[in-house]
Image: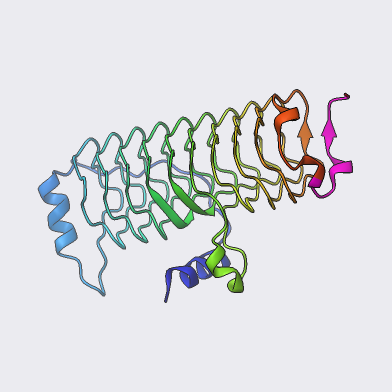
């Protein structure tokens, strides 16, 4: 199954969320050698199982975790730069302050994971489930993001120059894009980001920086842009029904606001 098909299958298989829980007790912290030994012992029929394991502060840069069960694992402060986390399950995992620069998180499940303050600069999150995850204060500059981020917390996160635009090569299977429905994005920095066809419906972008960002063709239904900086941002053909633009900076320099859909239903300051 291709990654794109797997993405669609994963979204269709989304189940009701159980109550959020804390990571299960994991016993003695693992060493780097023990982690690598568990990974090496895995087979095609028995993927690596590191569920609940404590790998905090370990240097696991470049390590291949693909298909691993990492549910409720503790990776706080771990070095995972250029690690391969392809199709891993990191549900409820703790990765606060982790270094995930240029890591491969394609097809990964990060549901309710805690990545507060983590560094994901240049990482790839294609077909990734990030529902209800905590990425507040995280660095996602220059990341590639196509996934499901409903109710995620990215307050104060940096997404400068991130490529979050819809996948133009796969539209025959439906729009593959980033979905931030009801996400907390207040004071996040999207400057220069590609947000083509993004779904920000009901999201909180109060005080966010969108300088030079491309939000064209996006779904911005009831999105709250209050006090955001939209200087040079492109809103052409976006649906802004019910969107709030009170107190925004750079409105005169924004592009395409006169070409948006349902502009008469958006809320602006009087001019």
Residue for point 30% across, 38% down: 99
Instruction: Report the magenta residues as a range.
Output: 259-270
From the viewer's perspective, tell me whether residue 55 is left or right of residue 148.
left
Residue 140, position in %: x, y?
44, 39
From the viewer's perspective, tell me whether residue 108 is left or right of residue 16.
left
Residue for point 25% across, 70% down: 46
Residue 58 position (above or below residue 72): above
From the viewer's perspective, tell me whether residue 111 is left or right of residue 235.
left
Residue 250 position (above or below residue 179): above
**Number of numbered markers:** 0
Q: Is residue 269 magenta?
A: yes
Residue 158, position in %: x, y?
48, 33
Residue 200, position in %: x, y?
66, 45
Q: Is residue 83 magenta?
A: no
Pick whichever, 59 or 219, lies toward us. Answer: 219
Residue for point 81% across, 50% down: 261
Residue for point 50% across, 44% down: 20
Pick whichever, 128 or 268, lies toward us. Answer: 268
Residue 44 position (above or below residue 73): below
* Residue 241 seen in the figure: no
Residue 11, position in %: x, y?
55, 64
From the viewer's perspective, tell me whether residue 36 is left or right of residue 132.
left
Placement of the N terminus among the 4 image quadrants: bottom left
């Amino acid at each position: 199954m291709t990654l794109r098909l797997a993405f669609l299958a994963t979204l269709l298989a989304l189940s009701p969320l159980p109550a959020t829980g804390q990571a299960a007790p994991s016993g003695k912290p693992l060493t780097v050698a023990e982690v690598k030994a568990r990974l090496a012992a895995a087979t095609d029929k028995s993927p690596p199982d590191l569920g609940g394991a404590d790998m905090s502060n370990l240097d696991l840069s470049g390590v291949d975790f693909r298909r691993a069960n990492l549910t409720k694992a503790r990776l706080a402060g771990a070095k995972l730069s250029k690690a391969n986390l392809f199709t891993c399950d990191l549900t409820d995992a703790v990765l606060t302050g982790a270094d995930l620069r240029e890591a491969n998180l394609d097809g990964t499940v990060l549901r309710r994971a805690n990545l507060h303050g983590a560094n994901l600069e240049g990482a790839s999150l294609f077909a990734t489930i990030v529902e209800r995850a905590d990425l507040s204060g995280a660095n996602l500059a220059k990341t590639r993001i196509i996934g499901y981020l409903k109710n995620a917390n990215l307050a104060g996160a940096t997404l400068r120059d991130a490529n979050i635009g819809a996948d133009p090569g796969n539209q025959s299977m439906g729009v593959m894009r980033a979905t931030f429905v009801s996400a907390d994005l207040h004071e996040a920095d999207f400057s220069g980001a590609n947000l083509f066809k993004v779904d920000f419906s009901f999201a909180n972008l109060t005080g966010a920086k969108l300088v030079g960002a491309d939000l064209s063709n996006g779904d911005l239904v009831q999105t709250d842009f209050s006090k955001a900086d939209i200087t040079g941002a492109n809103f052409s053909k976006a649906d802004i029904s019910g969107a709030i633009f009170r107190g925004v900076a750079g409105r005169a320099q924004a592009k395409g606001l006169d070409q948006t859909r349902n502009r008469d239903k958006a809320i602006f300051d009087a001019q």
